Amino acid sequence: MNAPALLPERATDRQILTYYGLPAVKPSLWGGLVSGYIFIAGVGGSAQIIATAADFARDPRLAPVIRQGRYIALGAAILGAPLLIIDLHTPQRWYNMLRICRRTSPMSIGTWVLMSFGLSSFAVAALQYVSGRLRRPSRTMQTTMKLLEVPAALTGMAMSTYTGALLSATSTPLWAAAPCQIAALFGASAMASGTAALALAGQCRGASSEAGRALDRIAFLASAVEVVLMLSLRRRLYEKGVAEALGDRGSGLAYDFGAVMLGAGVPMLHHGRRILRPNRARRPSMMVSLAVLAGGFLLRHILLSAGNDSARRPNDYFRFAGGPRQ
Amino acid sequence: MTVHPRVLDYPQSFLPGVIPDEAELTAGQRVGAGRSYGFFTDTTLCIGCKACEVACKEWNALPADDLGLRGTSYDNTGDLSATTWRHVHFIEHIAENGGRATTMPPFQSNWLMMSDVCKHCSPAPCLEACPTGAIFRTEFDTVVVQQDICNGCGYCVPACPFGVVDVSLEDGKAHKCTLCYDRLKGGLEPACAKSCPTDSIQFGELGELHDRAHQRVEVLHAKGVENAYLYGAPGTPGATGGLQQLNAFFLLTAPPETYNLPRAPSRPAERVGPSLAAGLATIAGLAFASLAMFAAGRAD
């Protein structure tokens, strides 16, 4: 038997020596609660962004969108925090998250982002509610709202995307191999989901046709960006040799048909058609909005569980942590 | 091998208490705060006795794991976990045709054995991921989870590039090797190193351990073990991708993957910046596009 040379090269790219096929890294303990949070954080964060953008346009016909966006954002912050606390394994110590602020930890960054998003969203929504009840809202109130909606929207941007860094700043091969793609995809998907949530709210609670037209365009753009990013993520994972966990029949089909086609592709075509032919199909389809929301959740849940799966595959990890490619 | 002269001060079998600076007698050096300590695990000396696993469990009062047979050679431990902080790997070299190897490389059997442990990385990915500050770097340059702070968020678990840290579902806290923080405080050598009968696990100050390890590699090369190399010492495999060094480092004689170690691990914190920037740039672009679309609607 020949002694192996100093740091021998891998036999082939696909075939790597493993230790009885046992995992080399541990998968995260996250499940549905965390994918649910990532989804809700995206919907709320982006609803706040869209509400602020609508407010900046100074168009009185957009008032319902602004109002509904602010309430959705507050709802997401109220719903999201308990999801994270329940997911802790010692939930009664949740406040220890507030002991430090650490920029190398997206979990710590996220704690403070969620705190500031929640507080600013609460303030904006409360002012919105009070000024809606008053016959003549005071100018101070309006100015305060305008001042507060900017930090609310900025933290909303962080809410929609920091969860990508949360996944990628780990040693889980599927997440760590595509730090930029996942965060960008979460951002685009959050904008699409936020728009869908606002479109649904508009259907239920009433909205102007101007708001509907603008939302159609935002939805089209966000879905188009999302489709491109989904495909580029797929490609990146293949290039890095870590796509096998996503290529498994179950999650691969769910990703391609559920997240890419139903959650982004069909909505993109639907909104594209409505932009080109505004007179046909008056109302945006509620089904399409629901599909965007379902696809947004599915995307996050598939990426989360496929990531956990990839951590259990030593070959995937060794390909990711294999040093410069030969 | 020489015996420290202070050993003669303690001839009795049952001691009245802890020997002051006991590490000086067992590991050849005193333990002092402010210096860097670590393990040098020389796998060419490991005989697979698992004394380290037992000593670790005994000292740290860790419960027994599943006692079943795994069918993976003599390794019935499987992996490092919340309740297993030392784990001996057993790799049986089998010839390429699938049969037993009939020849042997010099100074080695056809077995590879390696006692795995937390690497106490510098910088440590688990510490950098910890959002509560429960994981900290001690005065001995080791990495420890403070049990009274940890809230079991579990982020250190996927952050670790070596699959070491684990959250116990029994008590809901993260656990891993402490490099016997309590023993170091009391001037004692860590339990696993003290119990190692062949000195495969060596405890000491890092600078000295590095010198010793490099010398050992040279000795092995001279004896014909040309495949001996260090893993985790500065500038060697394992100390890659932003990880300056592993305070617990190894001497290996086969590719790292054989021992379930990554060839080029990386520091997850280096992905935070690019990821946040890409995400924020995308959403900022979409936010400005939304503003433009709302504003365009007003012009109609």
Image (cartoon, coloured by chain):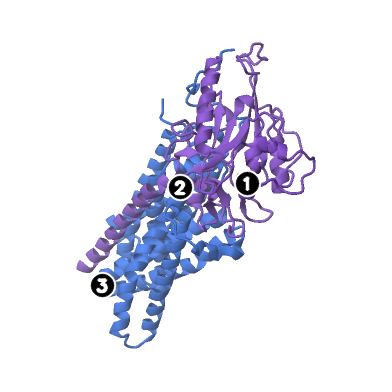
Chain colours: A blue, B purple
In this image, A117 relative to A298: left or right? Answer: left
Q: Which residue is mark 3?
A: A59
Which secondary structure, mark 3?
loop
Q: Amino acid at mark 1?
A: Gly
**CA gap, disc 2 and disc 3:** 41 Å
| Dot 2 and dot 3 within a common chain | yes
Q: How many marks?
A: 3
Measured from the top left, where is residue A26 in percent x and y? 57, 43
Say which residue appears at 25% left-offset and 72% top-offset. Answer: A58
Q: Are marks 1 and 2 in contact (CB under 8 Å)?
A: no
1 or 2: mark nearer the eye = 1
Q: Residues within 10 Å of mark 2 (few under 14, many from 20)?
A: many
Q: Which residue is mark 2?
A: A169
Q: Are marks 2 and 3 in contact (CB under 8 Å)?
A: no
In this image, B288 relative to A207: left or right? Answer: left
Q: Is residue A250 above or below residue B151?
A: above
Q: Which residue is mark 1?
A: B187
Which of these two is toward me, A21 or A213?
A21
Q: Is residue A224 above or below residue A12?
A: below
Which of these two is toward me, A296 or A28?
A28
State the image quarter where residue A120 is shown. bottom left
Q: Residue under mark 2: which chain is it in? A: A
State the image quarter where residue A187 is shown. bottom left
Residue B80 in view: no
Measured from the top left, where is residue B150 in percent x and y? 58, 57
**CA gap, disc 1 and disc 2:** 37 Å
Q: Amino acid at mark 2?
A: Ala
State the image quarter where residue B251 is shown. top right
Residue located farthest toward the bottom when viewing the structure as drawn: A135
Q: Amino acid at mark 3?
A: Asp
